[in-house]
Amino acid sequence: MLERPKPDETKATLQEVLSARERLNTASLAAALSKRSIKMLGTVREPLFCAADVDAYVSVGHYLRTIRNYILDGHIRQLEVTDANGQWHQMYFFTEAGLYKYLLQSQEDVAGELQYYVFSLLKTERAQYLEAALEIAKKNEAALERIHQDLLAEYANLRALDSQPVVREPIPKCVEQPLGPGCLYFIGKADDDTSPTKIGYSKNLLRRLQNLQEANAAKLVIRRAILVTHAVEAEARAHKYFKDRHRRGEWYDLTPEAIRTYTDDWE
């Protein structure tokens, strides 16, 4: 059974990371209620119960007479749903509060049994949902803490470099260990000096080369790289120096001589 979508409900309202867990708990709740021939819409957090099915289950037979008051206090909703043949019909659905209120008005034992049954189902499914949400929150908190510690370490490294002179050194053909903070690099296609060169900055040159390689079919190589104290400023200076050779993004039309001249004159 599907609810006809409304124009203002086209955007997803569930958090992406929790939507799968919520759908699982909602489906479990709906399946349990269907065993008692009670249709359910909504979610495990905000369930809606078919009023006609609830009334039939407790054998009261007067829910239509009380619908007006329930609509006024927001305990029942009128929705358009499909039947097994795909036909649309208007039906009334109790909210959770409306369901409990309706069952409490009945003197039948089956009404009390249904109220306890629904309450227990919701308690179990919501507990599982909340446990999943807490677990995700803990993972996010741990990830944020790792980022925070990385930033503190990087800040300490940059402060330590402030009192040191600028060091420049060509990168050898085989680099076994990643460079420290502040590497200004020139990367381009192998065996094609006329191809564009990317000018950028990275704390880990090999990882940056690997990331660029994954997005490029041609083999890339490090044409030149230097270690600097203020890498962001160095990158900006290089972009400005070669602005007349700019092609797109951080890619420039540079000859080996132009790169060598710039890096050899680096102060």
Image (cartoon, helix red, strand yellow):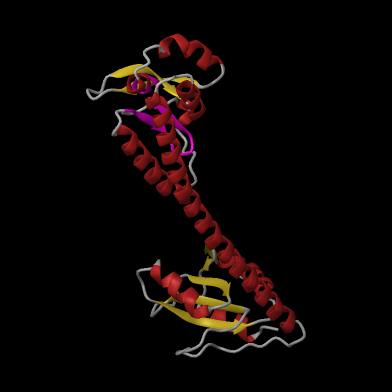
Judge whether residue 134 is colored magenta.
no
> Which range of residues does the magenta coloring cover?
38-54
| Residue sitting nearer the eye, 144 or 126 | 126
| Residue sitting nearer the eye, 259 or 173 | 173
Q: Residue drawn 45% across and 71% down?
A: 211
Q: Quadrant of residue 219?
A: bottom left
Residue extending furthest left? 85
Where is residue 74 drawn, in percent x and y?
54, 21
Relative to residue 34, is residue 50 depicted above or below? above
Q: Residue drawn 56% across and 65% down?
A: 143
Where is residue 122 drawn, in percent x and y?
44, 40
Q: Is residue 192 left or right of residue 84?
A: right
Please identify the quadrant where the C terminus is shown. Answer: bottom right
Q: Is residue 5 visible?
A: no
Q: Quadrant of residue 250?
A: bottom right
Please identify the quadrant where the N terminus is shown. Answer: top left
| Residue sitting nearer the eye, 181 or 2 | 2
